[in-house]
Image (tube, grey):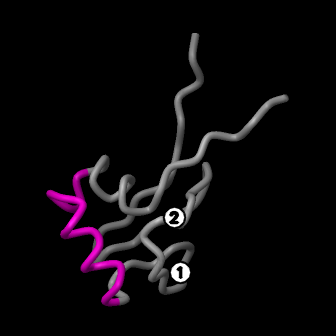
Amino acid sequence: MDETPTIRLDQFLKLVGLVKSGGEAKHLIQDGQVLLNGEVETRRSKKLHPGDVVTLGEYEAIVEWEEPD
């Protein structure tokens, strides 16, 4: 069965360098400062999928995965 990979919103923010810690991600998300596909997302454990767009302030990141060789 081919499962699409996912990552949690708070983990993604940290991975792409928009936050320095999980705690910072938690506060920004719960304060309604993070957009997912143009809508406020307040669940830090929200699973992201390839193609999702995460916005924090003026920064935007698109969820992508590299295919393994």
Q: Split into 4 quadrants, where in the image is the C terminus?
A: top right
Q: Is residue 68 above or below residue 41?
A: above
Which residue is the extreme one toward the bottom? Answer: 31
Picture residue at 45% right of the left edge, 78% below the top: 35
Mark 1: secondary structure = loop
Looking at the rendering, which quadrant does residue 19 occupy? bottom left
Q: Nearer the viewer, residue 59 or 16?
A: 16
Farthest left residue?
Answer: 20
3D distance between C-alphas at marks 2 and 1: 8 Å
Which residue position is annotated with label 1? 38
Q: What element does badge 2 sit on?
A: strand
Magenta portion: prevailing SS class: helix
Other-residue count near label 1 (Cα within 10 Å), few / some / many at <14 / 14–19 / ≥20: few
Extreme residue in the right direction: 1
Residue at screen point 35% across, 78% down: 29
Residues at discs 2 and 1 in contact (Cβ within 8 Å): yes
Given the image, on which type of amino acid does mark 2 rest? Val
Counting from the top left corner in percent of width and height, residue 51 is at 61, 54
Residue receiving disc 2: 53
Q: Is residue 69 left or right of residue 45?
A: right
Query: Measured along the vertical axis of the image, is residue 57 above or below residue 7?
Result: below
Q: Earlier in the sequence, mark 2 or mark 1?
A: 1
Reply yes or no: does residue 52 show up in magenta: no
**Residue type at the position of mark 1:** Gly
Q: Residues within 10 Å of mark 2 (few under 14, many from 20)?
A: some
- In magenta, the rendered stretch is 17-31
- Tell me: residue 48, above or below residue 3: below
Quarter of the image that includes the N terminus: top right
